[in-house]
């Protein structure tokens, strides 16, 4: 990782960030596009007078949101972490917010040190005046029972190539899923999945297939079949980005980190009713 030259001692600053991704072309810097990382880098340059590299834990796509994105950068600025939060938020637009900054060991890397990531997808059964940019409104009734049955096949380690965007580079197609399940409250059904890593478009294509199952267009066994065969089918059912949130990034030693709990058995999924209402 590159580090700033000159000035005071080099420090590694870890950020916890939330953002609404509607206006952005994703997390990663892209030429000619407005991105979350791009706005954060501009805020760092404006507020701290440095142009560091920023390392993010999750490369969220265009229109995807985050409640718990983690990033880190090196700085020689002597500002305390709480001042860095104020400085960055003062330079950021309202739809990006730094929740926390803290100094961490120089060896910490937001992406490489993560042991799990948790995503949540929000499906609405009715139109909403307040949450339209944060949900997917599915107009027909869904069978939660059929979707739950299908989601049980996700637990354990599987090859998720069928659920991935194969135009992108895939280094490791086998993914360990620690938890996958649904929560329902009022008009909102939330699907949560936690895994050691995610392939491009994987979370949204899983949701798209589960919705097809909930609509009765696919049998519950489809998830298991797509995991055992490499097929193109899930691409046509990719869920829109509006309902997807990067909820949490887990590191060794965190409460609930995978190393501290037994992994879900292959063919199992944890299910909990009674979720909170929409996060925004």
Image: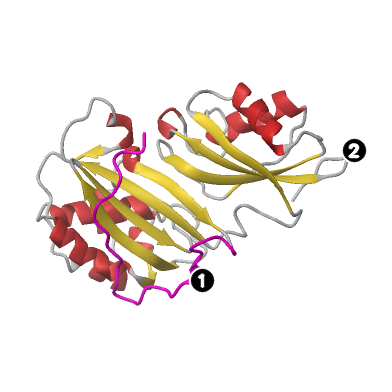
Q: Identify which residue is drawn at 69% across, 55% down.
A: 108
What secondary structure prevails in the magenta region?
A: loop
- Name the foreground residue: 159 vs 256: 256
Residue 129 located within the stretch drawn in magenta: no
Q: In this orientation, does residue 58 appear?
A: yes
- The magenta stretch is 252-280
Q: Identify which residue is drawn at 16% across, 65% down.
A: 220
Q: Identify which residue is drawn at 44% across, 66% down.
A: 173
| Residue 271 image offset from top left, x and y in percent | 27, 62
| Residue 245 image offset from top left, x and y in percent | 40, 44
| Residue 196 image offset from top left, x and y in percent | 48, 64
Q: Give the label, 2 or 1, closer to the camera.
A: 1
Residue where numbered disc 2 is placed: 6
Q: In this orientation, does residue 235 appear?
A: no
Residue where numbered disc 1 is placed: 260
| 212 relative to 223, above or below | above
Q: Residues within 10 Å of mark 2 (few under 14, many from 20)?
A: few
- Image quadrant of residue 176? bottom left
- Name the foreground residue: 252 vs 3: 252
Q: Secondary structure at mark 1?
A: helix
Q: How many marks?
A: 2
């Amino acid at each position: 990782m590159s580090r700033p030259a000159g000035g005071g001692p080099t420090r590694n600053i870890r950020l916890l960030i939330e953002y609404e991704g509607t206006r952005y072309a994703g997390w990663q810097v892209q030429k000619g596009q407005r991105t979350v990382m791009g706005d954060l880098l501009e805020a760092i340059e404006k507020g701290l007078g440095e142009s560091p590299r920023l390392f993010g834990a999750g490369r969220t796509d265009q229109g995807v949101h985050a409640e718990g994105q983690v990033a880190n950068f090196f700085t020689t600025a002597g500002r305390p972490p709480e001042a860095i939060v104020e400085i960055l938020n003062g330079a950021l637009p309202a739809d990006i917010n730094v929740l926390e900054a803290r100094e961490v060991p120089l060896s910490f890397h937001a992406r490489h040190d993560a042991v799990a990531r948790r995503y949540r997808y929000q499906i609405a059964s009715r139109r909403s005046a307040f949450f339209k940019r944060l949900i997917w409104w599915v107009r027909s009734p869904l069978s939660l029972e059929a979707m739950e049955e299908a989601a049980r096949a996700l637990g354990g380690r599987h090859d998720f190539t069928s659920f991935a965007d194969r135009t992108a580079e895939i280094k490791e197609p086998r993914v360990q899923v620690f938890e996958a399940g649904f929560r329902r409250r009022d008009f909102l059904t939330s699907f949560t999945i936690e895994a050691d890593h995610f392939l491009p478009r994987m979370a949204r294509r899983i949701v798209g297939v589960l919705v097809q199952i909930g609509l009765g267009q696919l049998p519950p066994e489809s998830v298991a079949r797509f995991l055992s065969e490499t097929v193109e089918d899930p691409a046509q059912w990719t869920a829109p980005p509006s309902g997807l949130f990067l909820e949490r990034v887990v590191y060794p030693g965190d409460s609930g980190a995978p190393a501290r709990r037994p992994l879900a058995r292959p063919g199992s999924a944890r299910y909990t009713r009674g979720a909170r209402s929409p996060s925004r």
